[in-house]
Image: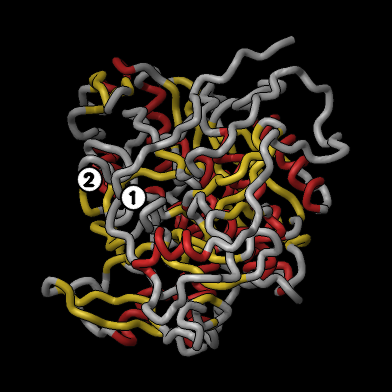
Amino acid sequence: MLRHIYTKGDPQYHRFLTPTQFTAMFSPSTLVASAVAAYLASNGMRNVKITPNRLLVTADTNVATASRAFNTEIHATLRGSHAVFVNVEAAQVPIQLAGAVQSVLGLDNIQMRTFNRQMPGTARATYFTRARKKVHTFAKARQDSSPLPQCNDLGSVIAGEIGSLLPTNVPNAPFTFCYPAAFTPRAYAVAYNDQGEPAGYNTAIADFTAGATSLPYGYGSLTDVISDLSQMETANGIPQVPVTVVQVGAQGADVSSQVEWDIDSQAAVGIAGGVYSYYFYNGYDLSLASLDETLSQFATDDNAALGNVSFGNCEATVGVEGGLASTDMILAEAALQGQTVTAASGQSGSQCPYPVGQNGQPAGIPSVWYPASSPYVLAVGGTSLLANGTDGTYYSEVTWCNVLSCGSGGGISTFEQQSPWQSLLESSVVGPSSIAARRLVPDMAMAADPYTGLVTYVSGQAEAGWGGTGLASTLAQGVYARAMTDEGNQLGNAAAFLYPEYMASGGGLAVGATAGATIAAGFSPPAPNGMTPAIVGGLNDVFLGTCEGEPNRPRVTRKKTPPPLQS
């Protein structure tokens, strides 16, 4: 059905389903879902609920009950320095439910990772912990005590730091771009050429989050995130967007990911120039089970055309957990309804830091991240944006991987098949090959290098140099919101739209042999200056740079424990 809905000329082209139609056509029957719910209740589980699309049955219980109900053992262990619990034997269901249950999630509390990073050495903001009575009452933007980086002639710096990525005919200096540079959302909009494109005023977008919502003010609260979004809007001359927090399930207590939600909301709304409305679909935590619940609610509500996931886990971990198929079905529902979910591709090159290390150090496995590897999302990787950080003037982009900073995730999926639109692109040039049917990640890329990062308001103060593929995926979300508004919200799933547009404009693949395998890579000839990408189907066809893994360099992380709230 996806192939029919997204193929021009097909009788079903762009006849998007409603949630009711999807449920009638694809969901398990009420009888099946009720049988699963009855089994959970008969084992003493509480708050047993069936989601409206009947794809999930949720319940609360303790370890002993869960172990007995699914004939498994759940042990406590350590994952690095974090205490976790996990089932050590495969979950089982009784024979009468055979064929009814696809996955059993929630038997572990392994958390996904958010994908943000700040440029090292950036001055830190002071947390605003005093109670504030109202949101959206800022007269002007507060600035960090240190000035934000401005555009200078950094040609000699760029040549020394990422010179290996540049063509030999590129002079060392001077250049018309900055590196490092700090970009406001408006500067990103100029760099990515918003001239003539309307703002996203008629398109509703969403972000998937987790953690505390009821804290009045203070670091870690979504109330703080909404206040920071308002401050960004004021500073960039963007009308205040209506914000709704949709709490899905119980509220969690984690406050460590506020920066990610700040980046997500400010980047998307900012580069879009404003949107119709903004939703936070907030789950209990960053587990796959919680993500499934928030994704399901997003699809069932069908209020927002675009959603974003700026976190993920190694695909291998999710595959072992059994969650790929169930999450993919929910993402497929969204695509059939014309919704788009953008997903950050991760920031450890072609490695996944499992079972040890962080961002590829000291070891990792060749793997991609999920949900970016799902064929039903628009997976977004990262670039270093070579542009003027003051006025946004675009010069070029290279893959986010150089001596200073490295991270764009990507590779070939072990578990997932290609979407119809990606398969069409690859098979049209490559033909049958050993990887022709395997999902390739990412689909596209935008600015992610923290050295060309976003000026982000965090607890009331501007901080420069926030990047990561979490930034890239929300920039892509904001740009697509503009396109959706321009086309009356009828474009549907972004990947399904962009692949055919790219091919119709002459975009293709360059094919080469590496270690006996056929490898496909995006390609277009460079422009006369040797660096500026050709524009193919409205996309900058980036062709410079590679990213195989994380270089050894110091890591900068945010202090996890915020100061206490003051009355």
Looking at the image, residue 147 sits to the left or right of residue 236; the answer is left
Position of residue 31 measured from the top left corner of the image (x, y, whole percent): 43, 43
* Closer-to-camera residue (237/12): 237
* Closer-to-camera residue (65/280): 280
Position of residue 507 measured from the top left corner of the image (x, y, whole percent): 45, 85
471 over 40 or under it: above or below? below
Looking at the image, residue 84 sits to the left or right of residue 282; the answer is left
Identify the amino acid type marked 1.
Ser
Residue found at x 41% / y 24%? 41
Q: Which mark is residue 348?
A: 1
Query: Which one is earlier in the sequence, the residue at label 1 or at label 2?
Result: 1
Secondary structure under tag 1 reads loop
Position of residue 277 measured from the top left corner of the image (x, y, whole percent): 74, 50
Residue found at x 22% / y 54%? 366
Residue found at x 41% / y 49%? 327
Q: Which mark is residue 364?
A: 2
Tell me if I can see residue 144 in this picture: yes
Identify the amino acid type marked 2.
Gly
Position of residue 203 measured from the top left corner of the image (x, y, whole percent): 72, 60
* Closer-to-camera residue (515/452): 452
CB atoms of marks 1 and 2 within 8 Å: yes
